[in-house]
Image (tube, rainbow, N blue to C red):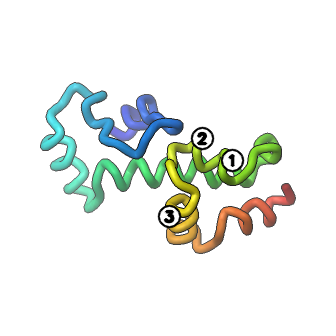
Amino acid sequence: MNVGIDNRIDFAGSDGDRRGDFAVMPRYVQALFAETATSFTDEVTKRRLARAHDMLASPRHAHMSIMDIAHECGFSTVSHFHRMFRRRFKATPGEVRGNSGN
């Protein structure tokens, strides 16, 4: 399942429901994630945040604004991105970027 998510995740897409991409019933996907005390949406958000963190820390993406990185990773609003990022990493996107020397 995790490989399938990595291969099909639409980082630049909406935060909508992509379970249909797996050719299984949504309830089955929910049950699989329930076994790990998470949800499909939580897993996608976690992966989008990890990608955003990597981009902010990378000199290769230094030319991109935080807003552009948020949108590139699938977040529709910057305020939502900032809240989720801070909750996950205990730092703001700007702090991560600043600590990386970019």
Q: Can you tell which mark lies on residue 12?
A: none
The residue that appears at 58% across and 45% down in the rendered structure is 71
The residue that appears at 80% across and 41% down in the rendered structure is 60
Q: Can you tell which mark lies on residue 72?
A: 2
Answer whether labels 3 and 2 touch (C-beta < 8 Å).
no
Residue 17 falls left or right of residue 29 = right
Q: Amino acid at mark 1?
A: Met
Q: Amino acid at mark 3?
A: Met
| Residue beneath disc 3 | 84
Mark 3 and mark 1 lie on one chain; the one further toward the N terminus is: 1
Mark 2 and mark 1 lie on one chain; the one further toward the N terminus is: 1
| Residue beneath disc 1 | 55
Residue 73, given in percent of the width and then of the height, sits at 56, 44
Q: Secondary structure at mark 1?
A: helix
Q: Residue furthest bottom?
A: 90
Q: Please tell me in which quadrant of the rendered image residue 68 appears.
A: top right
Answer whether labels 2 and 1 touch (C-beta < 8 Å).
yes
Residue 7, given in percent of the width and then of the height, sits at 44, 29
